[in-house]
Image: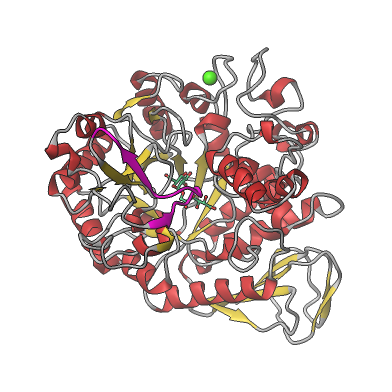
Amino acid sequence: MQDIFKNNSAYQIYVKSFCDSNGDGIGDINGIRSKLDYIKSLGVKYIWVTPFFCSPMNDNGYDVSDYRNVNPMFGTMQDCEKMISEADSLGLGFLFDMVFNHTSTEHEWFKKALDGDPVYQDYYLFRDGKEGHPPTEWVSSFGTNSWEYVPELGKFYFHLFDKSQADLNWNNPRVRAELKDIVKFWKDKGVKGFRFDVLNLISKPDNFFADTPKSGRAVSFCKDGPKVHEFIRELVRDTGISEMFTVGEMASTDIENCIRYTRPENHELSMTFSFHHLKADYKDGDKWSLMKPDLSKLHDIFSSWQEEMYSNGGWNALFWCNHDQPRIVSRMGNEGTYWKESAKMLATFIHLLRGTPYVYQGEEIGMTNPHFTGISQYKDVESLNYYEIMLSRGMTEEEALAVLDSKSRDNGRTPMQWTSGKNAGFSDSDGGTWIGIPESYKKINVEAQENDPDSILNYYRQLIKLRFDYPVISDGSVKFLDTGNSNIFAYERRLKSQRLVVLCNFSGNEEKISNIDVKGEILIGNYSGSHKIMQPFEALAILEK
Ligand code: TEU
Ligand code: CA
């Protein structure tokens, strides 16, 4: 099972923003089909595509109303089947995104629950509350109360995210059976694996609303619940996907659980996404704040996750970007003088670690945050909610917009920049696109980099290929090294007699390393082999044999 992903990489597509084939300003399945050769040219093997199933799109498809049908906004089932088979003929495998913690309140199951059907009410987490108050005052991930009252039923239902995303009751075997059938449906269509949305939140013990603290972030009470491993093992076993590529998105999880989720002998998942490294710029843990990334905290997170997962047989997904995160060049690199150097350094750091690397659409060309100037440009439910919350906390509009500019999920959701032409080559719509395209598309686009051997795009291609050519990257041990300089991160990978040393300068200044000497084959960068000054955002990879 390990071999299908140890030296392979994955590419993530946010379907709404990747490529629009019919000129409505919205990305779609046939747009993806038109770009399969491009994706193949990157050297990746897997494509994680975000949900394109029927949905009212309150959370851009993470609110599913029919798991077995394609949202007409994105195309037809026939388009989808062709996309899978065309990818397969190119040696590419799709990972479909299963949103199983919750369904849309437009789903037929929830509608039957609202109609009073007790069988379907037990598909969800309905509770009576007390004197009109919800069972708890927990805050959802999107900033609202995590309970919604249904007057007709005189009950509340629980939602960790938007009120239109009702949490499923995984303690109900009928729910688990329904979800297994959905996995089997898409497995039979030929997908090669699955990404499971917030999978570590699915186990809520029956009485947990009663005897837990009444206030706080709802996720903190639901993460890594008592039956989560049992449920995952059952799902994987009963759908026969233990030999497929599976990845769980794990919100607010920990190393101990991620070892359990990914140790091969546990037959749970191939790997997990954890997010602690993407909270190094959260001031006092608050996403909605402005803070430069704390590099020493970032370093400690990477070293502990890498070394402990390795020494306990776990397997990490490796990533900086996805559809929920700002662009990493803007967040931890440099948009100006060192744009190219910082994009390459950040890519090097991630791609030579132990785990499976993911490239998020546009990351491979160094796309940057859009720097929207007004709230009307933002579309994401989480961002719009927190804009109002920040104002209610006393921030000015300017201050709240500055926080969105840094942290909004929309930063990663602007259309893929293919060319410097109309709509950045994303769409030939004359009526604009569903979300704005930043001016950066004129400089940062695939066409401008395709044939430039020094481009970020071709650098990503080299990095992905290295993982195939050097087993020390896919199979080697990992150990972080002390460089004597908190701006320079270094780690070594070892396999048999080989030692790969990777050095990355995370700062925009020249930085000195005083205690690392290494001689060997230069895989990345140029190095004299003795004490040295690292240039701003310089990356080095040296292989000792
Ligand atoms: O994200 C889970 C999640 O916690 C996100 O809210 C994200 O981590 C957070 O916004 C970062 O601040 C998954 C999907 O990736 C996301 O797009 C969905 O909105 C969410 O689940 C609900 O399905
Ligand atoms: Ca379209």
Q: Is residue 250 visible?
A: no
Horizontal side, residue 107 vs residue 137: left or right? left
Residue 210: where, in percent of width, then height?
Answer: 26, 63
Q: Is residue 260 above or below residue 52?
A: below
Looking at the image, the residue that sits furthest to the bottom is 515
| Residue 113 belongs to magenta span | no
Residue 13: where, in percent of width, then height?
Answer: 52, 38
Observer-nearest of 430 and 503: 430
Count the marks: how many? 0
Quadrant in the picture for residue 289: bottom right
* Residues in magenta, as a range: 137-152
Horizontal side, residue 81 vs residue 464: left or right? left
Observer-nearest of 384 and 8: 384
Observer-nearest of 9 and 371: 371
Horizontal side, residue 467 vs residue 439: left or right? left
Q: Is residue 174 above or below residue 482?
A: above
| Residue 141 belongs to magenta span | yes
Quadrant in the picture for residue 524: bottom right
Residue located 34% across and 45% down the image: 193
Residue 65: where, in percent of width, then height?
Answer: 33, 30
Q: Is residue 359 visible?
A: yes
**Quadrant of the rendering where the C terminus is positioned:** bottom right
**Quadrant of the rendering where the N terminus is positioned:** bottom left
Residue located 48% across and 26% down the image: 33
